[in-house]
Amino acid sequence: MKDYREDTIVAIGTKPGEAAIGIVKLSGNNSIQITDRIFRANSGKKIFELDTYTMIYGWIEDNKKNIVDEAIVTIMKAPGSYTREDIIEINCHGGIASITKVMELCMEEGARIAEPGEFTKRAFMNGRIDLSQAEAVIDIINAKTELSLKIAAKNLSGNIKEKMFEIKESVLEVLVQLDAAVDFIEEDLETTPYDELKKDILKIYNEVGKLIRNEKKGEIIKNGIKAAIVGKPNVGKSSLLNFLSKKEKAIVTEIPGTTRDAVEEILYIEGIPLILIDTAGIRNTEDRIEKIGVEKSLKQIDDADLVIIVLDGSREFDNIDAQIINKIEEKKTICCINKKDIKQKINIDNIACHFPTGNIIKISALKGSGVNILEERIKSMILDNGDSGIEEKIIVNTRHKNILKEIQNMISSALEAIDNNLSEEFPSSDLRIAYELIGEITGETAREDILDRVFQKFCIGK
């Protein structure tokens, strides 16, 4: 990264391509001077004469005073801007040639092209936001559902930052007590007993544990749950997919082995994406193409977060059914006994020992009977038995989770030192490391390579 204090950066802030409006953004000490050299206001005023948060209409001109485009320029002077530097946004027409030419003129006057995420990095480096808020910006840009947008917006407002401050203060309070015991060891002064300190440290440990557990929920909200519908051929997997998606997504016939490849459909349950995958029927086959489909089905089982096994209630339970159940034993699973509308031959006793009672559901995928119960069960499993208030929780990302695990390990080590009645220096040393690690989440103690990794995920212009 170049020296952000010296350089003025420029980037196209809108998606490349033909559009009604295109925005070229500048940030840095020379943003106003550069714009003044390429922009002629209709009123004759210069940019530097204007107040912050002002918009002015005029023309972009090249160095020969030829008009390049009509434009409205927005001025946001430091420190009241996104980066806490002077920012200019040039709103011109969104054609590729015009917006590229405007950016080139800015570069001719001394600006350089911004690196990915450099505008947001400057906001971080200048103290307007912390690192967790910067990461929330990219989550807002990438949000695909209203729920993931809500969580990202809360994190941008400082949700994680505030929680980390709370935890840091709690660790600091314990450290002060431990250090006091060391400093005044020869004085006959009263210090906090180990048992009391252990309670405080356990509270911190549990708070960190909650955040770690919630990260998985955050990933589900952002990326969705992958649910594989599996079973033998002709048990009704495709009919179930069609009914759940309310579309004729998969081919349904009486011929076994119709589905040769995975068919996907995305549904949304309480704002969480559910990626349903109808897989090829699993059976022993000599058909080379069907064999590939079966192999893909087994791979989908491995990759799935949730497996919906469909058994044909009108047929007896057989070895292939048993083999499929054995394959999915370690997975989160719902068992659907399909074709409940016709005479049943399946022996429930063969199934009951493999699944919790609430996860065995009798349905008719063709007529839709019992599918509402299946939908409720899927919802319950996705939302952790009705935890629909997920947007009210503090949701950290994978980077935060990995740091929190390190913090938890150091806290655990401090607790162990107390249990072994070691001197105060030992738990104090562990908690001091934990204290420093908290700063990696907010960016206070993050190394340059970590910062680079975070901001490289951004698009240029943000």
Image (cartoon, rainbow, N blue to C red):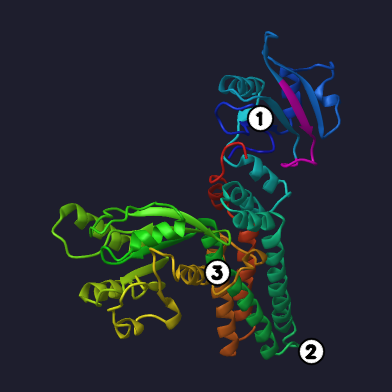
Find out whether residue 81 is within the magenta segment.
yes
Residue at (27% x, 79% y) in the render: 345
| Residue at the spot of label 1 | 23
Q: Residue 26 versus residue 421: which sits nearer the camera? A: 26
- Residue 346 lies, in percent from the top left, at 28, 79
Q: Quadrant of residue 299?
A: bottom left
Q: Residue 14 versus residue 380: which sits nearer the camera? A: 380
Q: Residues within 10 Å of mark 2 (few under 14, many from 20)?
A: few
Q: Residues within 10 Å of mark 1 (few under 14, many from 20)?
A: many
| Residue at the spot of label 2 | 189
* Mark 2 or mark 3: whose residue is earlier in sequence: 2
Say which of marks 1 and 3 sits in front: 3
Say which of marks 1 and 2 sits in front: 1
Whether residue 429 is visible, yes or no, is: no
Find out whether residue 150 is within the magenta segment.
no
Vertical side of 349 occupied by 379: above or below: above
Vertical side of 439 occupied by 51: above or below: above
Q: Give, as a single range, the part of the protein colored magenta.
A: 71-84
* Mark 1 or mark 3: whose residue is earlier in sequence: 1
Task: Find residue 125 and name its label.
Answer: none
Say which of marks 2 and 3 sits in front: 3
What is the spatial separation of the Cα atoms under label 2 and label 3, in whole angstroms?
Answer: 52 Å
Q: Is residue 145 left or right of residue 165?
A: left
* Mark 1 or mark 2: whose residue is earlier in sequence: 1
- Residue 160 lies, in percent from the top left, at 67, 62
What is the spatial separation of the Cα atoms under label 1 and label 3, in whole angstroms?
Answer: 40 Å
**What's the amino acid at mark 3?**
Leu
**What's the amino acid at mark 2?**
Leu
Residue at (22% x, 76% y) in the render: 318
Task: Find residue 383 and name its label.
Answer: 3
